[in-house]
Image (cartoon, rainbow, N blue to C red):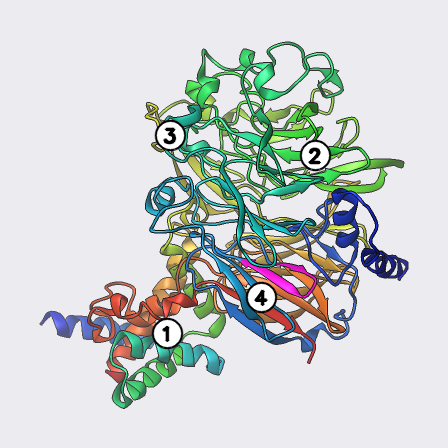
Amino acid sequence: MFKRLIFIFISYMISIDSAESNDFPTVARSEFVFACMSSNESNRDFMAKCSCAIDEIAKRINYEEYAQAEAIARLQLGASPREEAFKSVGLSKERMDKLLRAQAASELECF
Amino acid sequence: MSILKKSIIASAALALPLAVSANSKLEKMMKDPSQWVQQSGDYAGHRYTTLDQINKSNVGSLKVAWTFSTGVLRGHEGGPLVIGDTMYVHTAIPNIVYALDLNDDQRIIWKYNPVKGGKYPGGETMDRVISVMCCDNVNRGVNYHPNGTIVLHAADTSVIALDAKTGKEKWITTNLHAGTGKYGVSASTGSGQPFIIKDTVGVGCSGAEFGVRCNWTSYDINSGKRLWRAYSMGPDKDMLVDPNKTTSMLKPIGKDSSLKTWPGDAWKIGGGSIWGFYGYDSKLNTLYYGTGNPSTWNPVVRPGDNKWSMTINARNPDNGMAKWLYQMTPYDEWDYDGVNEMILVDMKVKGKNRQALVHFDRNGFAYTMDRASGELLVAEKYDPAVNWATHVDMKTGRPQVQDRYSTAHQGEDVNTTNICPAALGSKDQQPAAYDRLSGLFMVPTNHVCMDYEPFKVDYVAGNAYVGATLSMYPAPGGTHLGNMIAWDADKGKIVWSNPEPFSVWSGAMATAGGITFYGTLEGYAKAVESKTGKELFKFKTPSGIIGNFMSYKHKGKQYVGILSGVGGWAGIGLAAGLTDPTAGLGAVGAYSALHNHTALGGVLTVFSLP
């Protein structure tokens, strides 16, 4: 039941994210696939799944937003005042939410 | 062009066996644009290269010439040096130094790691040092002395002289122990560059969050012997000031100028750290640096001006005596450290030729001073959002603080809101550049405001002594957190301003090609036209950029280098699922399995024309 609710929620999220310009450079896709395979399994099957995942993400968020979300994620790993400044801001939440929605969608499509 | 010619002559002169002093030898090397011999490029802190092979008409076709992975995670500030055919690259903690052979595909000639068996030379463990670094594991780079020495100021405050050819230790001295109590300090650390003047090397210290009393200490470059030490606060003899000769706002500072401005002996843990980028004028024989915030961050417990925290210092580097002092933020209530870079420019100010010092302070004001006399010439806001003070009174030099943004006026346990700038300052340590072509200053800035709530803390040696809760957000009326600006230091006005989604935390570099380089936290290396700010080039490096740009020439080709790296490799976090690393993409033990790949943290990217 819970899973089903999540599915409905995510489907709803997918539907409100409009298609973006699909403008990821190959190197950014490769980096994602590389990291994704490293965090899962380094085999042919996961190369396909991870490639599918980044393609799905790239359909839902443009590269500029992705790069910003990536920067926020990176900063969130640290704890200095520089990093603190970027944790509470509205932009951070907005970008991260959009990325997480795209990521959730990619999980449904590819895994 | 004439500058270029001069520098060619200068570099040719280097080859002659002249008995020149270390000072003039180093200054000659600074004029040779094929090398980058000090962190700021030169003593004046211009961060300007006379090379113009890469210029505004061709920078768009800039390509990556080579990259070098430092193998170290976390923030990479500062930048590499180039001496002859060798490049020196430093890293965040553990503060590794690499020497790379530019003649042989950047082969590593030597690698030096000051941490041996988990411990720094001063005896502290690396983990303990990391625990008392307030603001990430950064180091702002090594410097070079012409007797063939590379000096490293390691995080445990050790000053380490290395043979530039072999990487062997010549001498090591630990400036201030990061441990508890020793030398009367508690938990100071080293992050600022070691600064070479004549046959000395000077270092500041970090750790105002830990109740230290910071100082500048000068060492003999040949022996490592301590020459003098000037504290930021305390009795006159500790600060190396002469009550009758040292001036502030052109008047003698008088006896006990610091002691009078602290309650009791609060000055003993008064902070005033020094870790930014410094300046030196060899004609005036004067060293310039800024001191940081008084501790604690809670102002209620330290009524008074807290001198000489938040102060521009002009000192004789031979004996440390202060010539003049100027306190920018008396009685700091916001953590507006005064440590930012000192840029020395001979320029017209209000129609008069001046030997000027230009300083973009954390407090949001840009100061233009006469660096010979210490006279205050211009003090204007370089971000219109700045609101904690209405203006600086030019007679007294004091900022006119607005009560509603005064965290002391509002009191302990009261949340003072919408203060601009945030504690990060309108600019932090990220150094600005001076464009000699346009006469403009290229300034990377923050555009962040904050709520600040001071609370009472008791000092325990070696523990954080912050005493304030902060939350930060973009300045009103926008969503962007940074601007790259061009500043007119005579008129005190912004000439152009490019909004950036995040704080611009990299050091800028201006070039004779009419362009300025800077980097962003998303990792973009950018080149803009210096005169207009028009973006001409953009390249995504592997991580966020908080390092400083530099340039050199090798075998007839101009190169531009920049370190990137802030806290880990985000690609990992994203791909493994940020919300729950064990759930994302069905990952099992994701992070531990990624150890090998996270070495991609710090990367030096070097560009050239194809």
Question: Are circles 4 and 3 on residues that touch, CB within 8 Å?
Answer: no
**Based on the displayed image, in which of its 4 quarters is residue B548 positioned?**
bottom right
Question: Are circles 2 and 3 on residues that touch, CB within 8 Å?
Answer: no
Q: Front-most of B61 and B99?
A: B99
C-alpha separation, residue under disc 2 versus residue under disc 1? 57 Å
Mark 4 lies on residue: B100
C-alpha separation, residue under disc 4 versus residue under disc 3? 41 Å
Q: Main secondary structure of the magenta part?
A: strand
Please name which of the two marks, 4 or 3, marks the residue nearer to the observer.
4
Mark 2 lies on residue: B287
In this rendering, do the residues under marks 4 and 1 share a single chain? Answer: no
Q: Front-most of B109 and B443?
A: B109
Left or right: B455 in relation to B308:
left
Question: Are circles 4 and 1 on residues that touch, CB within 8 Å?
Answer: no
Mark 1 lies on residue: A17
Mark 3 lies on residue: B465
Residues shaded magenta: B81-89
Q: Secondary structure at mark 3?
A: loop
Please name which of the two marks, 4 or 1, marks the residue nearer to the observer.
4
**Based on the displayed image, in which of its 4 quarters is residue B550 positioned?**
bottom right
Does the rendering let one see residue B585?
Answer: yes
Above or below, B159 against A6 in this view is: above
Does the rendering let one see residue A19?
Answer: no
Please name which of the two marks, 2 or 3, marks the residue nearer to the observer.
2
